[in-house]
Image (tube, grey):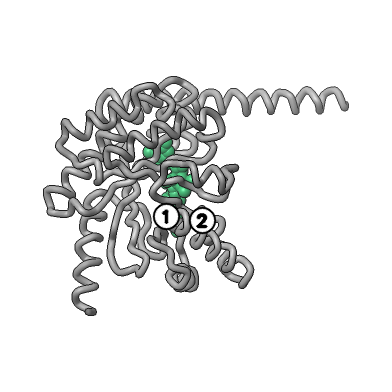
Amino acid sequence: EEGRKKERKEMLYEKEMIDLFRREEILLKEMREAIEKKDQSTLYLAFQPILSGNGEEVVAFEALARMNSQSFGPVSPMEFIEVAEKNQLIQRLSDCILDCALDFMKELRRQGKSHLRVAVNVSGYQLLKEDFSESLLRRLKSEGIRPQMLEVEITESVLLENFQHLNDKLKKLRGSGVRVALDDFGTGYSSFMRLQELHLDTIKIDQAFIRRIKNEKEETLVSDMIQMAHRLKLQVVAEGVEEEHQRKNLIHFGCDALQGYYYAKPLTPEEALLFADRFKEAKDFFG
Ligand code: C2E
Ligand code: MG
Ligand code: MG
Ligand code: MG
């Protein structure tokens, strides 16, 4: 009896493994096809507005990768980006993401909105590639986009290894005008010492901290993070702002920019452009 149970358990486990493996295979196949055919209904970007610290104007958009799988429906970028990284597809996927971001930037420019930045998430694998900054700058140049319009978001985990090497790359990027943001700040391992050495413009405080803005202790923590960043001449973006009391507190703490469902979810390019217009109009209207 016990033996049979164990056997069944193992079979179930095996089945789950096969399902997972097949899911990965299918996702990979669909991604390859979508990239090949430039199929923007399967792989595309959503753009989430980032508002100025007073919450009065749009200052940037974060480009977030989206996959709508024929077999599984919407798939989280956490999942499909990892699948792409594991299977040597990340380079091509990243190129495709950059193409899409550049199209959006060109549309912004066409509409006289070149002052709005676009932030693109960059994975460790990409950053480690030998000619990452060179090819990025080449792309911007050939599209006629000012580097100042682009921000790259990197995560702390990337910096655990090859710190010096990566930091040199960041220095080069910033030297040519591209802005650099440290994403999910507070969830990784970087010490304040490291923060001081890093070639950064911005830190993005992870939504886990913003969610905890309820009691006074946590409010002090976020406020201290903001003060510390300002002392290091860094700008601060708060991620995952959902509630009015979070927004109010963050503005009171002097946070430079706010992002979250309170203002807008990640939008289609068309919606994002409209949002930028409407927000300005609304502000002009209400004085
Ligand atoms: P991230 O860069 O920290 O992106 C922020 C995530 O928070 C996004 O999830 C966004 O949709 C979500 N978010 C924004 N506002 C709110 C809010 O008010 N409440 C809540 N609960 N969530 C909010 P998403 O789009 O699922 O992306 C997850 C992660 O996947 C990203 O985290 C980023 O690490 C990665 N990712 C997304 N797009 C790309 C990409 O193009 N390249 C790379 N390498 N990674 C990407
Ligand atoms: Mg990000
Ligand atoms: Mg983040
Ligand atoms: Mg994240």
Ligand 3 near label 1 (Cβ, under 8 Å)? no
Q: Is residue 174 visible?
A: yes
| Mark toward the viewer: 2 or 1 | 1
Image coordinates for residue 49, horizontal then vertical, percent? 32, 56
Q: Quadrant of residue 170?
A: top left
From the viewer's perspective, is residue 193 above or below residue 278?
above
Please state the horizontal and vertical placement of residue 110, each as a whole percent of the image: 11, 48
Q: Callout 2 environment at 10 Å: few (<14), some (14 to 19), or many (20+)?
A: some
- In the rendered image, residue 171, in percent from the top left (x then y), is placed at 37, 36
- Which residue sits at x=41%, y=51%? 202
Q: At 52% across and 24% down in the image, what residue appears?
A: 22
Residues at discs 2 and 1 in contact (Cβ within 8 Å): no
Q: Quadrant of the N terminus?
A: top right
**Secondary element at image label 2:** helix
3D distance between C-alphas at marks 2 and 1: 22 Å
Pick the front one: 253 or 269? 253
**At label 2, which amino acid type do we have?**
Gln
Say which mark, if any, is on residue 233. Answer: 1
Residue at x 46%, y 28% (from the top left corner): 165
Q: What residue is rendered at 21% in x and 54% in y?
A: 115
Q: Is residue 67 visible?
A: no
> As shown in the figure, which amino acid type bears the numbered disc 1?
Lys
What residue does disc 2 label?
207
Q: Which mark is residue 127?
A: none
Closest to the observer, 252 or 50: 252
Name above or below for residue 247 compared with residue 133. Answer: below
**Within 8 Å of ligand 1, the CB of disc 2?**
yes
In the rendered image, the residue lying farthest to the bottom is: 287
